[in-house]
Image (cartoon, helix red, strand yellow):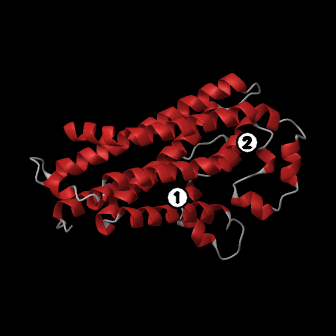
Amino acid sequence: MILVKKELKYTFKNLFIWILVITLFNLMFASITDLITKQNSPFTTFLKRMPDAFLKAFNMDISIMSRPEGLFGSEGMTFMFIFFGIFGSLLSTKLFAGEFDTKTIEFLLVKPFSRKKIFTHKTLAIIIELIILFVVFLLSELLFFKLFVSSSYSNRVLFAFALYLFVTEIFFASLGILLSLYIKDRKLTNSLLLGLVFFMYFASTVTEGVENTEFLQKISIFHYMPVIETIKNIEVSYFNSFVILLISLAFINLSLLVFKKQDIKI
């Protein structure tokens, strides 16, 4: 576990910053939920005047804005999906593509560790940090809703939010590992992954209801984690989340095969 501890120590500062951001974000949304969800609140009146295309782009649905989960689900989750996708992407490229940028991969490979062990420990460090951020989000979300939200809400829906974010960060982290091993340039890999995060998210929202764009929605993972439908029906997309996690596992296994057989060129 020496390598795991090394990687966790190496990325601890970044993780702490993200934990702080996510916690404060949850605090902000929970503290204003009662004010915003009041009938005929200024915010709701403002949204009614917005074009439908604008509302869809940011995953807003006025019909759920009167529910406590509605504000966070339609507005907060827009940012959270992007935050968690970015976190997973940056973390994986830092621990993999970053090794090629800093020329430390060669030094690491001459250590008395097998390639499989190096890959496994790096990946385990990534998964641990992803789980930590997931737990922080879920606990802070539940705590702040309990403290600040007076009207009734569904803890099941709040858990669904956390589950979807965990699936998002796992997917982009696993994809980041795979791309890192092929591209080997941290800046280029980061740019590509960030582009994919934004493309997939807005492909699942902006194109909704637009003719001949259904295929763009279907290639986006966010399409299979429908927040608004989850709020309306109080149903969690467990199956879709499980399938996306399986795809992520496939990316990781493929990355392991590449890492074990790939010639390291610096």
Residue at 77% x, 44% y: name it: 64
- Quarter containing the N terminus: top left
**Residue 101 in which image quadrant:** bottom left
> Which amino acid does the dot numbered 1 rest on?
Ile
Residue at 22% x, 41% y: name it: 3
Question: Where in the figure is residue 126, as x and y percent of width and height?
Answer: 35, 45
Q: Which residue lies furthest to the top in this view?
A: 147
Establish if 23 lies above or below 7. above
Residue at 88% x, 43% y: name it: 42
Residue at 43% x, 35% y: name it: 132
Identify the element where label 1 is drawn. Answer: helix
Residue pointed to by mark 2: 71
Question: Where in the figure is residue 120, as x and y percent of width and height?
Answer: 24, 47
Is label 2 or label 1 in front? 2
Residue pointed to by mark 1: 221
> Which amino acid does the dot numbered 2 rest on?
Leu
**Residue 252 in which image quadrant:** bottom left
Question: Where in the figure is residue 179, as x and y percent of width and height?
Answer: 35, 64
Identify the element where label 2 is drawn. Answer: helix
Q: Crowding at label 1, few (<14), some or many (≥20) Cα neighbours within 10 Å?
A: many
- Quarter containing the C terminus: bottom left
Whether residue 1 is visible, yes or no, is no
